[in-house]
Image (cartoon, coloured by chain):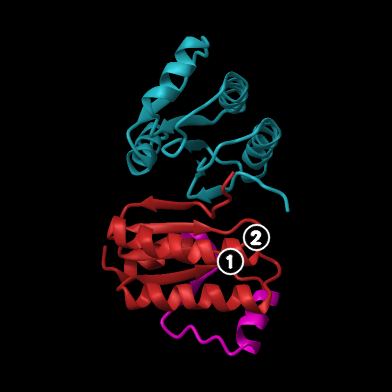
Chain colours: A cyan, B red
């Protein structure tokens, strides 16, 4: 059984909700999947929902930060939603700068914001 | 690590995308999760996306069929999307009747249809 983070396509966006703790292998697979799905579907934006992530170690944080930067390079807008305080702390303390990324409180607001940014 | 089928809440709907083969235990957990999330979030509808399911054994089909009927009893409208021929065959051959369920080709169309049915 391959355990992948599910990536949903809705309108022009990809929706990714990480609902369990990722191990290193899953995180790398997620990065690859996200980028190839972005290429395949020609989506214009990504909503990355982290509502259910309450802990993120430095490796996972780096892989996810990289994935976001890569997706941005590929031309997608990224909105992160539902960051818990501990995750925000990890990201900032590790010096992972996500300048190109907007954030929103929850999935709905994130999708709205993304569509506004994309001018839909 | 608990392997759950992720359930996303978007607007008044729950979106569930099954992207890997479920085993018996995961299917039962999915049934419970779906119903309790439905109760918690007071969602009015469910889009169940089976695009990535290419095989379904009789037990899983029954559990999913039951989950749909239970959700309908709880007052939710259910739309199934992306059924592959083999899955449709299994459901019909097993005599799992999903009269209350509409279907749509893909997630986007399913969500549109659900919102139309809910009169949003």
Residue A119: quarter of image: top left
Q: Give the image location of residue B110, x and y in percent.
A: 46, 65
Counting other residues with Cα less than 10 Å from the Cα at mark 2, is it few (<14), some (14-19), or many (20 or more)?
some
Do the numbered discs 1 and 2 sit on residues whose CB atoms are within 8 Å?
A: yes
Give the residue number, with chain letter if any, for mark 2: B52
Judging depth in this view, the residue of B81 and A60 nearest the camera is: A60
- Residue at 54% in and 49% down: A8
In the image, residue A13 sits, relative to residue B79, either above or below, namely above
Judging depth in this view, the residue of A40 and A104 nearest the camera is: A104
Q: Give the image location of residue B92, x and y in percent.
A: 61, 86
Q: Give the image location of residue A63, x and y in percent.
A: 62, 24
Judging depth in this view, the residue of A111 and A82 nearest the camera is: A82
Is A21 one of the magenta-colored residues? no
- Residue at 53% in and 72% down: B64
Counting other residues with Cα less than 10 Å from the Cα at mark 1, is it few (<14), some (14-19), or many (20 or more)?
many
Q: Do labels 1 and 2 share a chain?
A: yes
Report helix, strand or loop for mark 2: loop
| Earlier sequence position, callout 1 versus callout 2 | 2
- Residue at 45% in and 35% down: A50
Q: What stretch is highlighted in magenta?
A: B86-108
In the image, residue B72 sits, relative to residue B81, either above or below, namely below
Q: In this view, does A42 lie to the left or right of B113?
A: right
Residue A4: quarter of image: top right
Identify the chain of the residue marked 1, using the numbered disc in the image: B
Per the model, the C-alpha gap separating discs 1 and 2 is 8 Å
Give the residue number, with chain letter if any, for mark 1: B82
Is B88 one of the magenta-colored residues? yes
**Residue B110 appears in the rendering:** no
Of tags 1 and 2, the one toward the viewer is 2
């Amino acid at each position: 059984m391959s355990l992948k983070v599910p990536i949903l396509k809705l309108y022009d966006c990809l929706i990714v909700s990480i609902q369990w703790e990722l191990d290193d292998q899953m995180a790398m697979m997620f990065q690859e999947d996200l980028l190839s799905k972005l290429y395949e579907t020609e989506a214009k934006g990504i909503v990355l929902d982290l509502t259910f992530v309450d802990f993120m170690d430095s490796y996972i944080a780096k892989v996810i930060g990289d994935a976001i930067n890569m997706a941005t390079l590929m031309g997608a807008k990224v909105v992160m939603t539902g960051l818990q305080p501990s995750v925000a702390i990890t990201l900032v303390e590790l010096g992972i700068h996500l300048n190109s990324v907007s954030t929103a409180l929850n999935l709905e607001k994130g999708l709205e914001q993304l569509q506004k940014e994309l001018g839909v």
